[in-house]
Structure formats: structure tokens, C-alpha cells
Amino acid sequence: MKTLIDIKQDMSELYDAVKAGTVDLKTASELANISGKFLKAEQLALARDIFINNKQLVIENDAR
């Protein structure tokens, strides 16, 4: 599973590819939309675990 850091890196690389002209804007938009949906699903799962299932929030530092 990708982490937030992985997605940020992917979006950064996608932005660079669009700037360089190696990826068209429509494809980049679709990929960004998919990433946004993935992040929203993870956000909802986290909220469900915390507020409905009463799980403890654990934050891990993935700093590289």
C-alpha cells in the first residue's frame, strides 16, 4: 500500500512530466483524480476506526 509520502512523490513526478510535456494534461488530471479518491477513502476509513470503532489513533513518522 502506498503511503502519503509515496503519493506526494508520485504527484510531484507527474507535475514534472506535465511540465516537460511527456504526459498530457488529461492523463495527469485522471491520475490526480484517482489519487484524490484513494486519499479520501483512507481518510474515511481512519475516521470510521477512530469515531465508530473507538480505536486509538497511532501516528507513525515515515520521514526519510
Image (tube, grey):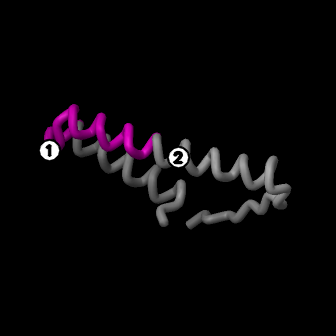
Q: Residue at x 53, y 54 (%)?
A: 4
Residue 53, percent from left and from top = 80, 56
Q: How many marks?
A: 2
Residue at coordinates 14% horizontally, 44% vertically from top-left? 22
Give left or right: position of 36 versus 43. left
Kind of residue at disc 2:
Leu
Q: Is residue 44 above or below residue 3?
A: above
Q: Is residue 12 magenta?
A: no
Q: Please state if 30 lies on the left or on the right of 11 as rendered.
A: left
- For mark 2, give the secondary structure: helix
CA gap, disc 1 and disc 2 = 25 Å
40 and 9: which one is in front? Answer: 40
* Residue for badge 1: 22
Disc number at residue 40?
none
Q: Which residue is mark 2?
A: 39
Residue range in magenta is: 19-36
Quarter of the figure with residue 24: top left
Q: The residue tagged with tag 1: helix, strand or loop?
A: loop
* Magenta segment includes 31: yes
* Residue 64 image offset from top left, x and y in percent: 56, 67
Q: Quadrant of residue 59?
A: bottom right
Q: At x 21% / y 32%, what residue is drawn?
A: 25
Q: Can you tell which of label 1 and label 2 is closer to the viewer?
A: 2
Q: Is residue 11 above or below residue 3?
A: above
